[in-house]
Image: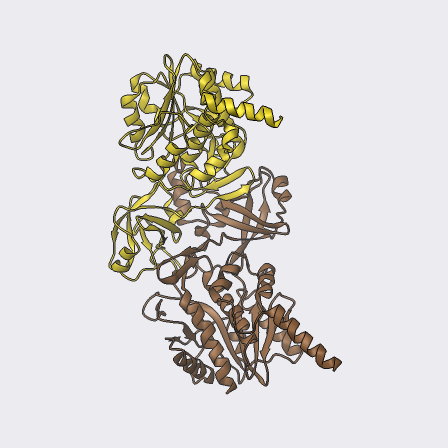
Amino acid sequence: MKRTFLYVALGAILIVLRGAPSADPIDVKDVLKEIYAIPAATGNEEQLTAKIIALLPKGLAVEKDNLGSLFGRLGQGEAGLTVVAGLDEFGYAVSNVLVDGYLQLDRLGQPPLGIYDSFLIGHPVVVSTKAGLRNGIVVQPAMHVLTQELRDKLSRNLTLDLVYVDVGAHSEAEARAKGIEILDPVTLSQDMATLANGRLAGPAIGQKAACAALTALADSLFGSKVPQTVSVAWMAQSRMSARGARASLGAIRAKNRFNPKATVVLGAVSADRGEKSPVFGKGPVILQAKDSPSPLRDAIDAAAKEKNIALQYQSGIESPLLAPFLGEGADAVILALPVKFFGTPSEVVETKDIQSLVDIVSAVCSRRGK
Amino acid sequence: MSKNRAAIILFFSLTIGIPPSFSQTGSSDWDLLRKIVMIPGISSQEVKVMDWIAGNCPHGMNVQRDVKNDVWFTVGTGKPHILFVAHADELGMTVEKITAQGTAVLKGRGGFLAQACEARPFVIHTAQGTVDGIMLPRPDFDARQAQPYSLEPYELYLGANSEQEARALGVAEGNPVIFKKKIVDLSPDILATRAVDDRAGCAALLAAALEIDWTKIKGKTVTCAWSVEEEIGLYGAAAIAKVLKPDYVFAIDTFVATDSPLENKRFGYAQLGQGAVLRVFDSSNLTPKPEIRRAAALAEKRGIPVQVRNSRGGNDGSVFVAGGAVDIPLSWPGAHAHSFIEKIDRHDLEALTRLLKAIIEEWK
């Protein structure tokens, strides 16, 4: 009797903590808005993971690995699908604090575009410090006194040698008093623009949208009866040759708990870039390493048809996100959002595509269970 | 102060029609700047910002407005006639045409560093409201060896799929286009955003006008003016100069400061945080040195920090010189002029406001 009462009480507490399971799933657009402005330069994903944990159902147990990746399990029964998404965006690190208070930068990994540094000039950035976020601006000379020589350098041959971040400090001591330290991450100010047809634009919005989709997916699966054990992982340092993915894989394998045979990587892909490129507005894209038979791809196809969602396909992809999940006998694909102006400060995504990722993978989880 | 005493003062203040003082309005120059800087007003389309200025002038003033939308009020009679002018227009573009694909091709380059516009959000101000758009990146933006960003095309992606969709959003030829502004607070006393040039000057003049006890201004004529179309040729000030012939004109505008690591300090080196600026000469004007000394002495007398410097760029006061005025430009050190991150220090703005007040009260 006592034990029954205890179970009932625990269940009630869980419902209170969680809210009504699946009755009121979190909207993926709301998740994106919640996480979008949180900087997550490669290797500095702590704030974002903390936010994701806060957004996930309270009853969902998640664990972090040594690099900061998040891992959780949903559903019941045999091990089934694994769904992962990267946490990190490209960013810089403070490499020097000058005597007059300006900061100089170095890159944290490879930028998404060769011209990426040129997007810095004359725009706000955010420095993530131990004391919180600090606003900065990247110095641009006044147009009235700009020499042709400097104009050419800025427009044609910009290097990080010409990039100085102004944090409103007049000296190194003032900058440090703001909590700024060497290696603090620096990212573009995450300002979102809302375009026609429910399209959203901003820096690294493709990556953040995939991350939001996985979060919303985990939320929706938690409240439903998924007839398989679905593993979900948010990868830290995914831009560093998927180090986060390997670490997740390695750590969990070591514990003999996580040996994915079927993995969907939620990601982003450049759209509208020529004949072979995915087309923006034509639905999510399945990216495969080889154009070979794939039960996972078939399952995704079937789920998309069931949901009346159009898909696009691309194969021959050598993605560092995919490679860690393509071991012997393993099946893995990337399910990607088509992104217009990929890698620029104004990546554009369709909100309906983000929801489509959630709907498709959610349906795959149910189908595979059947 | 007792409640009774406060009530008596309030009664007499209302009875004799004293304009609300600085403290009564509760708005500092800094607060005014933060408000006015967000109001759109590209050159020749300044109605909204001029409405705001006219609506915030001291109560009881006879606010004038000409056909170009210049706004001013004049207090007092007699000589000298001193006139202050700050321009309220900002850099921007207009929609030239809407393409079949639903993008908006822009007219004008805005006077910005082209590179800073690439793949950045702009706002079209339409009759139906605002519409966000993204400046198209260079065509080969993802190439390993991309070509330099050029001025062509200057075109906004709106998210629309067709001309019809774009027009349904309210976008039309002639709509003003400005950078999607946000205020970046670098500290409680330093901000950066678009259009600090010359909304800071507008705010300082408005704050001084709100603070002055105009009943005490005797034996001279004082005009406070806010002009349009400075950025495209000083046209607003030129229109005012046709009807007003001051003896002294104090143009209030950005001092193009070279206070950043990328700039030569040979000229334009006024440091942020070190006070207002007496702009002795620029590309449009050379102020007689005795007048600069007078202004500097007045500042010193009141303990107002000022810097005496030379720089580049023109100023509205220069168009009054032909009518007999001496042009004494007043400024604050403005870093990154004509960028999206024009930077200003609150202490400099406050010094400028105090200097304006001192000149209004004491200039002879």
Picture coordinates of residue B79, whole percent (x, y): 37, 12
**Which one of the lettered chains is coloured brown?**
A
Q: How many marks?
A: 0
In the image, taking residue B215 as reference, residue B147 lies left or right, namely left
- Mark yes or no: residue B308 visible: no
Picture coordinates of residue B300, whole percent (x, y): 54, 18
Q: Quadrant of the C terminus of chain B?
A: top left
In the foreground, A201 or B267: A201
Q: Quadrant of the N terminus of chain B?
A: top right
Q: Quadrant of residue B246?
A: top left
Residue occupying image coordinates x 43% and y 72%: A356
Extreme bottom residue here?
A370
In the foreground, A171 or B262: A171
Picture coordinates of residue A334, whole percent (x, y): 46, 74
Residue occupying image coordinates x 45% and y 72%: A357
Residue occupying image coordinates x 42% and y 35%: B199
- Rendered colour, chain B: yellow
Extreme right residue here?
A2
